[in-house]
Image: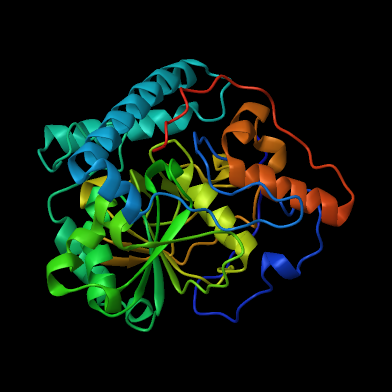
Amino acid sequence: MDTILFGASPAFPIKKSLSLLSLPLSTNQFAFSSNTTGDKYLRNSPHKVEESRGTSRDDVATFGEAAYEAERLRLDAEARRSMAEASGREAADETDPRAWKWAIRKRVWDMMEAQNVARFPRPVHHRIPNFVGASAAANKLSELEVFRVSKCVKVNPDSPQKQVRFLTLDGGKKLLTPQPRLRTGFFSILQSHVLTPSTLNEACTSVGVAKYGRPIGLDEKIKVDLIVIGSVAVDPNTGARLGKGEGFAELEYGMLRYMGAIDDSTPVVTSVHDVQLVDDIPVEKLLIHDVPVDVICTPTQVIFTNTQIPKPQGIYWDKLSPEKLGQIRVLQELKRKIEEETGQKLPSGPSEKLPPTAQRWR
């Protein structure tokens, strides 16, 4: 993807802008890009996007928690091997617009391991890295006014944000979290009133989300007040952020934007270790789908970035390859729906070679 968008996105608080659902349906407004090997999200419907079943407590009960977790770890390892291969190809290709990102990611991952601030699971390479002081950073995040007043918080499923997920539920808020790598479903909602003190901590894990969460689809009417996002590196001066390179945060953001659950004023917060703060992410090289952050919480400080980087406006179809689209049922249904409503055929991105598709429970 080499399209670059310039403009300003005011920091919160501001008045809520129009959601994507109220904007004219043009191919540009509904574009999205993501490196994803997503799986089944929606049942086929010629007229509407319906709710996905996703992974449920029945799956966990049927297959057993140990088997469920073993399969998740196997798929994670497979995905990381594929990511490592892809990063090597992209980093070596000087014409690839993503090559510079891998240099920064590798430097941060290497530094975290060398300084021993990395925590399980290790090595942290090709992950949203867990780090020493992740709970302290989460506690600082929970003290933010935007967190305290939020009723629904979307939090990524990675290890360093587990305490954020716990504090969200412990505070009586709704927790919206995606299935890991979106491989078995779309999003799940968890609510503290269906949990007990003994199940609250478990509900913050992948198995717990499957056991206690309610899967939702794109037709869900929901308002997300705060987005918590994992990062590999983030620039405190600009709010520019790099993830692990798969693009799931961007995919999730674009989906929520389409649902009308978020808009430009929805704050985006990340929690990282101080060594993950960098000053060499070139804003002019960011891609149109890259999600900037408004606030950074580390174990030692809280930084308000006042980012001026535009936030993505939706889904960029001209960057989504046919192969990737073929693996993501929810996007196939959404594309069909938009084309039916507008009478216009949406564009497709260039072809690409994808890693093996993650298997889902059967």
Residue 251 x/y as whole percent: 53, 48
Residue 233: image quadrant is top left
- Residue, x 66% and y 70% (percent of image)? 19
Residue 97: image quadrant is top right
Residue 249 seen in the figure: yes
Residue 220: image quadrant is bottom right
Residue 283 x/y as whole percent: 52, 46
Q: For the N terminus, give its image quadrant.
A: top right
Residue 306 x/y as whole percent: 46, 67
123, 154: nearer the viewer: 154
Q: Is residue 267 above or below residue 333?
A: below
Q: Is residue 101 above or below residue 16?
A: above
54, 147: nearer the viewer: 54
Q: How many marks overall?
A: 0
Residue 293 x/y as whole percent: 44, 59
Q: As drawn, is 200 to the left or to the right of 183? A: left
Q: Is residue 294 above or below residue 348?
A: below
302, 135: nearer the viewer: 135
Q: As drawn, is 167 to the left or to the right of 305? A: left
Q: For the C terminus, give its image quadrant.
A: top left
Q: Residue furthest left?
A: 116
- Residue, x 60% and y 42% (percent of image)? 329
Q: As drawn, is 94 to the left or to the right of 1? A: left
Q: Is residue 29 above or below residue 302?
A: above
Q: Residue furthest front?
A: 62
- Residue, x 29% and y 28% (percent of image)? 77
